[in-house]
Image (cartoon, coloured by chain):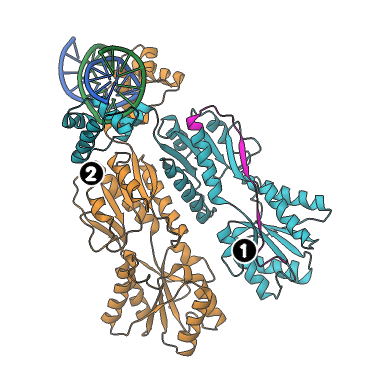
Chain colours: A orange, B cyan, C blue, D green
Amino acid sequence: MATMIDIAKEAGVSLSTVSYALSGKRPISSATRDRIERAVAKLEYHPTASARALALQRTSLLGLAVPQRPDIDNHVIMDFVGSILTAAHEQDYEVVLVTAEDRERTLRIVEEGKVDALMVMDIVEDDDRIPALARLPRPVVLIGNPQDAGGLACVDFDFMAGAMLAVRELHRRGCTRIGMLKPPSAGPEGPVPTYARRARLGYTMACAELGIEHRILEVPPETEAISALVREELVEKQSVDALFVHHEPALAMLGRALLAHGVGCPDDLQVVALAPTDAAMSGPWELSSVDLPVPAIGRTGVAMALDRVASPDLPAHSRLLSPSFTPRATTRG
Amino acid sequence: MATMIDIAKEAGVSLSTVSYALSGKRPISSATRDRIERAVAKLEYHPTASARALALQRTSLLGLAVPQRPDIDNHVIMDFVGSILTAAHEQDYEVVLVTAEDRERTLRIVEEGKVDALMVMDIVEDDDRIPALARLPRPVVLIGNPQDAGGLACVDFDFMAGAMLAVRELHRRGCTRIGMLKPPSAGPEGPVPTYARRARLGYTMACAELGIEHRILEVPPETEAISALVREELVEKQSVDALFVHHEPALAMLGRALLAHGVGCPDDLQVVALAPTDAAMSGPWELSSVDLPVPAIGRTGVAMALDRVASPDLPAHSRLLSPSFTPRATTRG
DNA sequence: CTGTTAGCGCCTTCAT
DNA sequence: ATGAAGGCGCTAACAG
């Protein structure tokens, strides 16, 4: 592998001249610059990343801790990863993936300076990683919005505002018995994703604000469970006239169950989902939805992380992306 | 950040003693080792990755080029990534992700020595990245098995053997009109994943070997298309008595379509899928299947890559993982 | 068993 | 506009 010294010799100039010519950090006569570029091409020179990193104290590597728990939706994870990759690449950063379950390693890559900053996905309430993360000597950005972020930067969708928006849009369309459909809360004291509480809170608050009853329906994503729920709650008891659905894996099944049970949508029941656009658009219907902006979250997180690399003592703050509602086929008007 | 020099001072020994104590590459009296460990703990010392990388000419980073095309199944990609992550971590390697579409960057991370080796997913027939990849000064492993690998190492499932196995198992169970269900081949001269040709070839070869007709059914993954195909081919024409399905996104729909059209399985029709275990087990039925061993492919690829980091001139070779058949609810006997 | 020293390849402050 | 030289933090001969 050719080094700068080789280039310097080949071009008949000094080492530092080569360095400056390549970085452009100081004016170089077009004559010598030319000879240098020729030498670079001839010797197929490429700067060595680790040497540069050592000298600059900067790796151009961004760490990303991704969850690998089997109960988590790989599809959404990959959407996040993709958007983060793209955003990082745009700033000439590479992304180092580590499994979030391997906490030692996650901490280690930043302690050893393998990465300039770290992003952590799948933050849960009372996440016990936060204290350790907060002690790290480099910027850390949480994807999620725990009640106590321990002084770390956070980015997430504003689930509370999103849920409220969904309820208001349904109410405005004449619904007065608006149910919320969600997955069962995890077991006794299992970890709770930070968005679960916030979405639920937004839903109940909006109902309170509008003076209507709230009714939370928890259902596992299995076909039979959903079908049963549709029959009982919608066909027999008719307990609701609208559904706010924060339960991606159940969306497709719900659509089919409604069809099968002859529940007309939006005539008998209006539905608003809280989901990524592609999830709302796939499946058997086109769902009116409050969009979960996965790519924007990823981009924002990268921006926050790299901003802090540039200015290490920006104040901690959490950035919550505002919701927007897109009416489609499952709401009236 | 404390450096080794700080540790040396604090422990009252020389720099190299610290280095050797930490690496264990030379015997150290337990006395001094003790003082060193104490100093390390006290100063919270962590080795600096870029310095070590520069000295060792080794980064402990493995590059992975992942496809980001929208027409590709994120779920499977993430399964691959997960298994590669795990395997790499077991060898104390980290994984750097780059989007495969960004070819310049993919080449660059290895030219600049940011990674010790590179794995490339989503290899297609006549992949025009291969020549450039083959020139790289570090090990490259292709995930996929193109006809011309240009001297690069490859790893993949043996799709040809897998397809043949599926056909034989169906034939052994009395089927004589075995169709193959697959997605439409990409447009006129679109890139073809390497497995498409090989699976198809295995299927036709097995049929020839058994002296039965072959019949390839291509269908897009849309509900209607699948439903229509079931009606026409299975209900009306009854053109086949068994289906070899290499078409993951269609699996769930196929199951429902058969149910809806009253095609009994395995009584009227036997089905063997070529798919990852979880795909075969989810959905409305438990499919008999030739297992697509995603985790094993990932692990093997990592092993091949790191073997070549250790011994840079291992001969190029392609490793094809052998198929195995798991009878479940969609075959007889 | 422990020290001394010369790099690894690049960046950058001085000096010219 | 160009050179010379020291340093980033760690490793590994080479000497005891």
Mark 1 is surrounded, within 10 Å at the Cα level, by few (under 14), some (14 to 19) or many (20 or more) other residues, namely many
Question: Residue A174: x, y in percent?
Answer: 38, 84
Residue type, numbered disc 1: Leu
Disc 2 + disc 1, Cβ < 8 Å: no
Indicate the position of residue A134 as horizontal and vertical percent values: 23, 51
Q: Chain of mark 2?
A: A
Q: Is residue B55 left or right of residue B158?
A: left
User: How many numbered callouts?
Assistant: 2
Q: Is residue A184 magenta?
A: no
Nearer to us in this view, A15 or B24: B24
Residue B201 tag number:
none
Respond whether the residues carrying marks 2 and 1 are from the same subunit: no
Position of the N terminus of chain B, as image quadrant, is top left
Give the number of the mark in front: 2 or 1.
Answer: 2
Q: From the image, tell me which residue sits under label 2.
A: A137
Q: Is residue B272 left or right of residue B252?
A: right
Of B233 and B258, the residue lying toward us: B258
Q: Residue B320's quadrant in the figure?
A: top right
Residue at horizontal 70 percent and vertical 76 percent from the top: B262
- Dot 1: element: helix
- Secondary element at image label 2: loop
Q: Which mark is residue B251?
A: 1
Magenta region: which residues? Answer: B308-333
Classified by dominant secondary structure, the portion drawn in magenta counts as: loop
Q: Chain of mark 1?
A: B
The amino acid marked with disc number 2 is: Pro
What is the x, y in percent for residue A55? 27, 29
* Quarter of the rendering occupied by the C terminus of chain B: bottom right
Percent x, y for residue A227?
Answer: 52, 79
